[in-house]
Image (tube, rainbow, N blue to C red):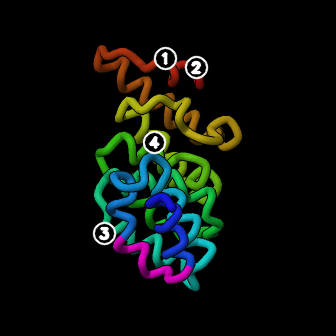
Amino acid sequence: MTWLARAVADVERDPETVHALFPRAARDGGPGARVELLRALAKAGPEPAEAVTRLYWQGDASERLDILRALPDLDLGPAALPLVHDALRTNDTRLVAAALGPYGSAWLDDHAFRQGVLKCVFMSVPLASVEGLDRRFDEELRRMLADFAAERRAAGRPVPPDVLERL
């Protein structure tokens, strides 16, 4: 059995083992191993959202990124929204972009989603990385982007092309 197959079996048998295995997963199990452990945890654990949240808070940026990317596959409902809100407060462009992936797009309220999009613009995260932007784009977001563009122009700075496309 490979390391990953053993680790998944261990998590299915005892969900608490994920806390020891998760930090080693990328190194010992290869790409995608963390996602597989999270899927096993979501199926086996009595409180998967609680366990995923604990892994997130204990993890480094790479582990948090893998968790955010895996959220759409874990069927946690809105329980993982605090993780998305935390990622949106960081200055790590990878975490911000992942926070506005499929899970964040599905569960963030309109205000938080708009603020996340604006943060992407400020951090030069391409708007193409924002899941569901076309579906969630509204007049308030258009106004916010127009205000941003006006401020950039007033300062003699260029407006990102992906913002101009939305105005």
Disc 3 from disc 1: Cα separation: 38 Å
- Mark sitting earlier along the chain (2/3): 3
Q: Which residue is located at x 58 percent, y 33 percent?
A: 142
- Mark sitting earlier along the chain (3/1): 3
Disc 2 from disc 1: Cα separation: 6 Å
- Mark sitting earlier along the chain (4/3): 3
Disc 4 from disc 3: Cα separation: 20 Å
Q: Position of residue 137 (x, y in %)?
A: 64, 39
Q: Does dot 1 land on a helix, a strand or a loop?
A: helix
Q: Nearer the viewer, mark 4 or mark 3?
A: 3
Q: Which residue is located at x 56 percent, y 76 percent?
A: 12
Q: Which residue is mark 3?
A: 58
Q: Which residues are magenta?
A: 13-20
Disc 1 from disc 4: Cα separation: 18 Å
Q: Which residue is mark 1?
A: 161
Q: Position of residue 112 (x, y in %)?
A: 51, 54
* Extreme-right residue of the structure: 135
Above or below, 1 against 122 in this view is below
Looking at the picture, tell me which residue is in the foreground, 143 or 42. Answer: 42
Badges 2 and 1: C-beta atoms under 8 Å apart? yes
Q: Which residue is located at x 37 percent, y 15 percent?
A: 158
Q: Does dot 2 land on a helix, a strand or a loop?
A: loop
Q: Position of residue 130 (x, y in %)?
A: 55, 38
Type of the residue with mark 2: Glu
Q: Position of residue 126 (x, y in %)?
A: 47, 29
Q: Which residue is mark 2?
A: 165
